[in-house]
């Protein structure tokens, strides 16, 4: 069976963008793929994290996976630091990847901002660790959002260069899976910015642990415009807030934007927001409740992560042993 690898960083409260862009896609993939779902805590520490908050966030992401429908008996669910093979392979790939490739990574430029000289080496090199996450399992597919496509392309370049350098087909050339509507969810307060846990306004995002009242309030206060909704997706051009809310509704309904607009075209936003509130509460409400219950059972969460870490290393250790033998390192 082909293998999926995907991960989510534990860097604060999870929100609707994390769910629609990644987590909800994990569930149906379990039917057709051997799935490895990782809480990528080593990626999180590329910027400083409060240790207690990081520990809580690791559990929160795990709870979100399970509440969304990921079966930890069927799929492997673990946190990255439980399997040292990720960091071990990352060093080998650091020696394969080229500086010029990393210099083209746009996310480093965005995250480092004007203080590039003060950014950590880990923040600069973390695309190589991301490649190691994937290649340690010889994953054949990775579900990615638009903002991660560049990193997967780097992973493919690294795998191809390694194979060429050692005249082998050791690593697969991993394929992207971009699934469904609203793979990039924008802020409820500014349709030009991605929904983010770092936004100072809590009204900009719907957190996965929000209750029905919070969900309803945030959608009611979401920024819109004064025009009625168009009858087709082309009419959303130049209306980022409208496009964002329609995209969210479409994704929550498992429809495309045109299908939604054929039904709601011509109505004003007050009426559309009422529909969106009902849909969001129906989908997110039960998951948020399940997350809160799971987070009260830390022993269970920790047992899932421990079991997943053991199962993950059982896959990667033989792959690393073969790689060491291939490149001439003693084991």
Image: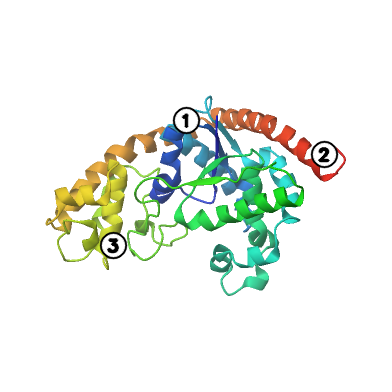
Which of pointers 3 and 2 lies earlier in the amino acid sequence? 3
Instruction: Identify the residue position indicated by label 3 in the image.
Output: 241
Viewed as shown, does residue 262 lie left or right of 157?
A: left
Q: In this rendering, does residue 303 appear at all?
A: yes
Q: Which residue occupies 62% across, 27% down? A: 307
Circle 2 residues within 10 Å: few <14, some 14–19, many ≥20: few
Circle 3 residues within 10 Å: few <14, some 14–19, many ≥20: many
Numbered disc in front, either 3 or 1: 1
x, y (%) of residue 15? Answer: 41, 49
Using the image, tell me which numbered label, if any, was put on residue 269.
none
Query: Which structural element holds mark 1?
Result: helix
The reply to whether callout 2 and callout 1 are in contact (CB within 8 Å) is no
Which of pointers 2 and 1 lies earlier in the amino acid sequence? 1
Task: Classify 268 as above or below 74.
Answer: below
x, y (%) of residue 135? Answer: 65, 43
Using the image, tell me which numbered label, if any, was put on residue 32.
1
Viewed as shown, does residue 58 lie left or right of 313?
A: left
Query: Which structural element holds mark 3?
Result: helix
Question: From this viewpoint, which residue is outermost toward the bottom?
Answer: 114
Residues at marks 2 and 1, CA–CA distance in whole angstroms = 32 Å
Numbered disc in front, either 3 or 2: 2
Task: Classify 225 as above or below 167.
Answer: below
Q: Quadrant of the C terminus?
A: top right
Query: Which structural element holds mark 2?
Result: helix
x, y (%) of residue 283? Answer: 31, 38
Using the image, tell me which numbered label, if any, was put on residue 325.
2
Most foreground residue, 57 or 173: 173
Q: In this rendering, does residue 222 appear at all?
A: no
Viewed as shown, does residue 107 lie left or right of 124?
A: left
Residues at marks 3 and 2, CA–CA distance in whole angstroms = 54 Å
């Amino acid at each position: 069976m082909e293998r999926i690898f995907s991960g989510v960083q534990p860097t604060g409260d999870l929100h609707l963008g994390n769910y629609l862009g990644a987590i909800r896609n994990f569930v149906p993939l379990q039917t057709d793929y051997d799935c490895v779902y990782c809480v990528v805590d080593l990626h999180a520490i590329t910027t400083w994290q409060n240790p207690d908050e990081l520990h809580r966030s690791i559990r929160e992401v795990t709870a979100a996976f399970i509440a969304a429908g990921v079966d930890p008996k069927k799929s492997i669910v673990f946190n990255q630091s439980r399997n040292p093979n990720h960091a071990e392979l990352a060093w080998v790939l650091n020696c394969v990847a080229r500086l010029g490739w990393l210099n083209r990574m746009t996310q480093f430029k965005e995250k480092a901002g004007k203080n590039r000289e003060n950014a950590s080496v880990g923040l600069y090199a973390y695309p190589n660790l991301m490649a190691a996450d994937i290649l340690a399992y010889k994953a054949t597919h990775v579900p990615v959002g638009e903002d991660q496509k560049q990193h997967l392309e780097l992973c493919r370049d690294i795998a191809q260069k390694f194979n060429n350098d050692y005249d082998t087909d050791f690593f697969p050339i991993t394929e992207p899976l971009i699934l469904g509507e609203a793979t990039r969810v924008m802020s409820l307060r500014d349709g030009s910015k991605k929904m983010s846990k770092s936004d100072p306004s809590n009204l900009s995002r719907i957190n996965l642990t929000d209750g029905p009242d919070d969900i309803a309030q945030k959608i009611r206060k979401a920024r819109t415009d004064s025009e009625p909704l168009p009858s087709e997706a082309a009419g959303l051009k130049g209306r980022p807030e409208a496009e964002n809310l329609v995209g969210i509704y479409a994704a929550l309904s498992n429809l495309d934007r045109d299908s939604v607009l054929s039904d709601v075209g011509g109505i004003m936003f007050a009426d559309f927001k009422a529909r969106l509130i009902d849909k969001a509460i129906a989908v997110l409400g039960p998951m948020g409740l399940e997350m809160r219950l799971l987070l009260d059972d830390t022993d269970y969460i920790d047992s899932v992560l421990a079991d997943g870490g053991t199962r993950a290393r059982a896959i990667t250790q033989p792959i690393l042993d073969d790689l060491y033998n291939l490149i001439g390192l003693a084991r």
